[in-house]
Each structure stands twice: as structure tokens, then as C-alpha cells.
Amino acid sequence: MKRKILVVDDEHMVADTLGIIFEKRGFDCRVSYTGAEALACTEDFSPELLLCDMSMPGMSGLEIVSSVTQKFPDCRVLLLTGHYTNLGSARKWARGHRAPSMIMTKPVLPALLLEEADALLHR
């Protein structure tokens, strides 16, 4: 059975590209561009891994992650940020949650992203 990943990024090109990368690797991948879309997606899709950008308009990445992991406590989390100033709040969030998580900065090489995703799913 394919592993399920939900990709959330307000930059459509980034989200779509990440979706393609994970689909080519054999994942069942869904892509959302807003927090509301991501939460609606989880109504019929139970992600095992949430790949989420931190800085988005409306609902922040950490708010999305908190909502998804409340509903799916075993969901792994891979946070992406293009802003180094977000790393402190991301690390603080990660210390307070039991699901395995990783924080990576953009841009990230696809091979490294896939490697970290695989590692999270095998923890």
C-alpha cells in the first residue's frame, strides 16, 4: 500500500512540484494551497506525513500542523521554511509534540527531502 502524504504550500508551483516528486517516488500524494484546503482534505484522506510550509497567509503552517496532528496523532510532520527566523518557533513546536518531526529550510534538494521523509515514516 502506498504511503500517504499531504503537501501544503501557498506557492502553487512549489506545492505542485513537491507533489510530483513524491508521486514519482510512489507516494499517494495530495496537495493543498491553504490551511482550509488542507483541513478539508483530511476529511477523506488520512495522511501519514504532513509536509507543510510554515509561512502562509491566513492559517500559519504551525496552526495547520497542530490541527492535523490533533486529528491524526501518529501523522509525521516535515516543516519547510524559507525564513531562518522561523526556525526557533518550529523547534519549540517540535519539542512539544510526540509525533516525529523534521524542520528543513528552502530551497531543499529533492533527494534530501525524500530521504528525510522516508526516515520520518520509518521511525
Image (cartoon, rainbow, N blue to C red):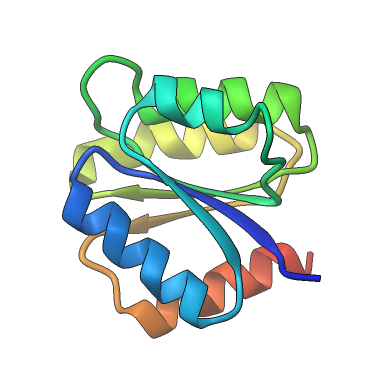
Is residue 113 at all visible to an observer of this figure?
no
Total numbered labels placed on residues in the image? 0
Q: Position of residue 97 (x, y in %)?
A: 69, 32
Work out which quarter of the rendered image holds the N terminus and state it. Answer: bottom right
Q: Position of residue 73 (x, y in %)?
A: 78, 33
User: Measured along the vertical axis of the image, is residue 96 above or below residue 76?
Assistant: above
Along the viewing direction, whichever of 115 and 89 lies nearer the viewer: 115
Q: Residue furthest front?
A: 44
Quarter of the figure with residue 62: top left
Q: Position of residue 104 (x, y in %)?
A: 38, 58
User: Measured along the vertical axis of the image, is residue 97 above or below residue 82?
Assistant: above
Work out which quarter of the rendered image holds the C terminus and state it. Answer: bottom right
Q: Residue at x 71, y 51 (%)?
A: 48
Does residue 107 appear to the left or right of 88 in the view shown?
left
Does residue 32 appear to the left or right of 6 in the view shown?
left
Q: Residue at x 67, y 63 (%)?
A: 120
Q: Residue at x 54, y 79 (%)?
A: 115
Q: Position of residue 81 (x, y in %)?
A: 28, 47
Does residue 1 appear to the left or right of 13 in the view shown?
right
